[in-house]
């Protein structure tokens, strides 16, 4: 089977690509509107782009002809929080993707508890195992749809107690959720640990 992207509209291409590029981590983002409304939305086009300083990127599309509230809020206030949700929060993550008017807070609709951040004004959610306070650094637009790739610097990281072991995050304890095609999500399956191809085998003598 062959698929020519030039023959497809944006919606069909999105469905195809979101079914192929899987699994995708989910950035669960809180941001503040100019009126002080706390917005919450999930984004599965998400990755880190720098380790020093730590920087994260999310791709924010449009809702109709306008950009989503998250993009407006981040570009206006230059602060936001990216959370990593675990499996007990799967339904809340999905429900937060429902579009609401800008004056409606998804956090309030879902009854989620918040905590103050330390370096920024945007509150963070209390329930997720990871919350990363971010300051906006760069925005790039791509394609005919002008999707916005928003890059921010992580200025503070909040981790649930018990997640770290010897300086590393215990993935099983984190229990992250991932997005696959359509309104479908996934949890971790088997985790396989492989030796580096550059690692010299230890002598058995």
Image: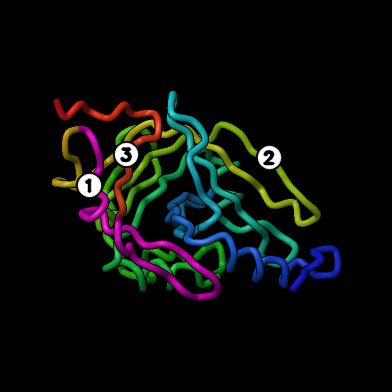
Structural distance between the alpha carbons of marks 2 and 3: 37 Å
**Residue that carries the numbered disc 2 in the rendered image:** 140
**Which residue is more in the foreground, 185 or 96?**
185
In primary-sequence order, the first of circles 3 and 1 is 1
Mark 3 touching mark 1, by CB under 8 A?
no
**Which residue is more in the foreground, 161 or 47?**
47
Q: Nearer the viewer, mark 1 or mark 2?
A: 1
Q: Quadrant of the N terminus?
A: bottom right
Q: Residue at x 75, y 63 (%)?
A: 65
Q: Residue 66 at what x, y percent from top left?
A: 71, 59
Q: Quadrant of the C terminus?
A: top left
**Residue that carries the numbered disc 3 in the rendered image:** 195
Structural distance between the alpha carbons of marks 3 and 1: 18 Å
Residue 77 relative to residue 167: left or right = right
**Residue that carries the numbered disc 1 in the rendered image:** 170
Eyeballing the image, is 138 above or below 70?
above
Q: Is residue 76 magenta?
A: no
Element assignment for label 1: loop
- Crowding at label 2, few (<14), some or many (≥20) Cα neighbours within 10 Å? few
Q: Residue at x 43, y 66 (%)?
A: 106
Q: Residue at x 23, y 55 (%)?
A: 172
Q: Nearer the viewer, mark 2 or mark 3?
A: 3
Q: Is residue 186 magenta?
A: yes
Q: Residue 94 at what x, y percent from top left?
A: 43, 71
Eyeballing the image, is 49 above or below 39?
above
Q: Quadrant of residue 145?
A: bottom right
Q: Residue furthest front?
A: 205
The segment highlighted magenta reads: 167-191
- Crowding at label 3, few (<14), some or many (≥20) Cα neighbours within 10 Å? few
């Amino acid at each position: 089977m062959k698929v020519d992207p030039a023959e497809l509209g944006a919606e069909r291409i999105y469905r195809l690509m979101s079914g192929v590029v899987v699994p995708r981590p989910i950035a669960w983002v809180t941001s503040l509107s100019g009126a002080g409304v706390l917005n919450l939305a999930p984004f599965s086009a998400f990755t880190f782009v720098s380790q020093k300083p730590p920087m994260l990127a999310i791709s924010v599309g449009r809702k109709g002809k306008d950009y989503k509230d998250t993009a407006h809020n981040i570009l206006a206030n230059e602060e936001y929080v990216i959370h990593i949700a675990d499996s007990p929060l799967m339904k809340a993550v999905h429900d937060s993707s429902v579009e609401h008017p800008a004056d409606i807070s998804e956090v309030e609709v879902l009854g989620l508890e918040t905590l103050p951040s330390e370096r920024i004004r945007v509150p963070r959610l209390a329930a997720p195992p990871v919350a990363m306070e971010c300051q906006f650094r760069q925005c790039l637009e791509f394609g005919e749809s002008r999707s916005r790739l928003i890059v921010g610097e992580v200025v503070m990281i909040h981790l649930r107690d018990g997640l770290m072991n010897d300086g590393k995050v215990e993935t099983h304890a984190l229990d992250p959720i991932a997005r696959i095609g359509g309104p479908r999500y996934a949890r971790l399956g088997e985790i396989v640990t492989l030796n580096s191809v550059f690692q010299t085998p230890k002598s058995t003598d």
